[in-house]
Structures are given as C-alpha cells and as structure tokens.
Amino acid sequence: MNYSLFQRPRSSYWWAKFPSVDREGKVVKYHRKSTKRTSKTEAHKVAQALVKHEADYGQLGVRAELTMGEAAQRYIAQLENPQGYHLLFAERIKSSDSRVTKDSSMYMLDRNLLNDLKSQRSVQGLSNSYINTEVAFWITVYNIAQKDFGAAVNNSTDLKGLALKTTQKTRYLMDGEETRLLDELNPQRDVYKQPHWTKRLGTDRQEMLQNQYDLAVFLLDTGARYMEVAQIPWSAVDYANWKTVNLYRTKVGKEGNLDMTSRLKAILQRRHAKYGNHPYVFPSWKHDKEPMVGDRKSLRDAIKRADLNTPSMVKRYGKFTPHSLRHTFASRLIQGGMSLYGVSKLLGHGNTKMTERYAHLSPSKLAEEAVSILEKTHDL
C-alpha cells in the first residue's frame, strides 16, 4: 500500500496518510495518523510499519496481542492533556490485586471483569461516581485498542449499562468534623503498632503521615481536586512572596490563582525548606523527579476513623469521600455569602451550572424575613 507524509500547522511532527483495504484489496477509507517523529527519515519508518499493520489487519484479519497496561499507556500517550485520573488508573494496575493488571491480555477485558472491579472498588470505600470514572476509562481503552490499535479484544462482550447509580447529595464537613478528621491525620498522633511520633521522626512512615495531613489541608483551603494537588509543581507556587498558588484544573483545562490561607502558607514554607530542590511539592516515593501518583487510602482510612459516615449521616447528606473536601471549600464560601459565580471561578468550573448544587446553602433573605416576622409574633 502507498502512503504519503505531510505536516500540520503548528505541529513539528510528520503525519502519515495511508489507505485501509478490505480482504479483496479495495480501499475502504484513508487514515491520517501522527508518526510522533520530527525526523522525516524516522517518520518514513513509522509510516511503513503503520501501512503493514493496516494491511495485515484488513487483508489477513491479524490482530495485535496487547496487554491492558500497554493499551492504557498508548491511549494516554495520544492524549494532548491527560488528566490526573488517567495516570492514576494506569499506575494502579501495576500493583493491582484485581484482575485488571498491566500484564493481563486486552482480550480478558469484558463485562464480568469490570463488574468485579466495581465490586472491589465499592468494598474499598470509593464513591459510585469515582468507580464510574474508572470503569469509563477502561471502556474507552477497550474501544481505542479495538479501533485504533488493532488489538485482539473480546468482541462478544457487552460493555453498556455498567454505570452505578449516583446521587446529587453534597456531603461536606459539618461543625466539629474538620477537627476530628485532622486529628486522625495529625502526624503526631498515636499510630497502631508504631513508636511514639518523636521516635518516628526522619522515617519514611512519618514522612508519609505528614504528606497526607499537608495534602488534606491543601485540599480544604483551595477546593482543588486530589490529583491537582498531588501533582502540583513548585513552579505553580509563589514562593518568592508566599501569597498565591496557581492551580491547573485538569478536568476543564483551566488555570487560576488562589491566595494562600495562613495555615497553607505555613505548610508550603515548611515543605519548601525540605523539598524545594525537587520539581514537585509532593515528591514521588518511587520515581526521582516525579510527583506522587496519589494515595487516597490513607485519607479514606482517616475518614473512617473520624466516624464521618454513620448510617444517619450517609442517609441524609450522602457519603463522605476525599472529594468531599472540595465540597467543603465550596459550601463554606457559599454559606459565607459568596456568589455562585464567584465560587464557580474559584473551583475552575466552566459555568455556574456545575456550581448550582451548592445553591441551597446560600443565605436566604426569605428565611431572614420569615424569622423577623415570627420574632414579632412572639411579642404578642
């Protein structure tokens, strides 16, 4: 099959245009794919491999054997701005205790496997919306692997209707609950089967405990999403004046500055003194010069120890999850009198429609008027 190379405006890569043929050798459509190469010589080699792959698939029905890890990484690599949870899901399968593992064949990705994954995540205490996001990620990997990577997948499986039911209840920290939660995250607390905190100083364990406390406060005082904070670089922190942090809202692809609270400022100054030579505020434990991928388990365990999900609270307000720290930030601003528009800007929402879930928390003039009238009747 023939192919041609071309370049697109504002792109340094060479692109290949080549045909897709059926078993009779007839052209059915044309593909245009980036070679991911700036060298034309190398681009020719990539284009030739693409043409051969397409011919094998179209004329011989040959499908590539891909693992779930390979397919996930290839999918992420082609995204212009991969979001934090993409990287989290792909990293998680490297040490997964479920059947979704990096070495499992894509052919194993079927409805039963995803249902098993949902059950496991539910037992781990993850919210339905979070579980749905992870399941949707793997369904996308399945579709991309089949259509774009020519991978061998189970074509007989049905991946529709797997989403769990979600509610619009907005759980946030009530009076006294922040103290209880931060007490359970306090790195100086007593830890089961661990020495006193003064003897833990300088250990990896104590550093991990400090990270989780610092990260929780960061989330509370900025309303950021977990991965937005876990992977924030020092270049986004105004460590010259210690006034603002610049958050990149991965979900909507927006940036915005937020002023630091006094306690966030103290935390960042302490972390800068220790990790200022590292590119990221929260360094990876395993990979040099990389940010932490994210470990919500420690935060979920603290939520459990703080007893924030009693049956009565869950029934009335919904389940408290790590994402509820973002809800707490928003609810406090609304209750303090900030407009929905203002809160939507601070949260990085594309519009106020996404912020309307907090509207019921706004101080009501009608409610104030009702109390005024009732107080007058009490004097009668």
Image: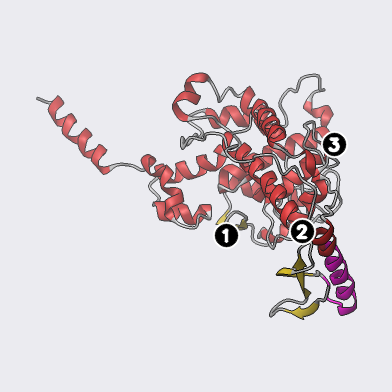
Quadrant housing the N terminus: bottom right
Helix, strand or loop at label 2? It is helix
Nearer the observer, 138 or 369: 138
Proximity of marks 2 and 3: CB atoms separated by less than 8 Å:
no
Helix, strand or loop at label 3? It is loop
Please tell me how crowded label 1 is: few (under 14), some (14-19), or many (20+) other residues with Cα within 10 Å.
Answer: some
Q: Based on the displayed image, in which of its 4 quarters is residue 363 positioned?
A: top left
Disc 2 residue type?
Answer: Ala
* Nearest to N terminus: mark 2 or mark 3: 2
Up-down relation of residue 220 to residue 257 (above or below): above
Foreground disc of the pair 2, 3 = 2
Mark 2–mark 3 distance (CA, rounded to whole Å): 37 Å
Nearer the observer, 340 or 8: 8
Helix, strand or loop at label 1? It is strand
Nearer the observer, 96 or 182: 96
Residue 334 in sight here: yes
Residue 267 in sight here: no
Q: Is residue 39 magenta?
A: yes
Q: Is residue 92 magenta?
A: no
Point out the residue furthest to the left here. Answer: 380
Residues drawn in magenta: 37-53
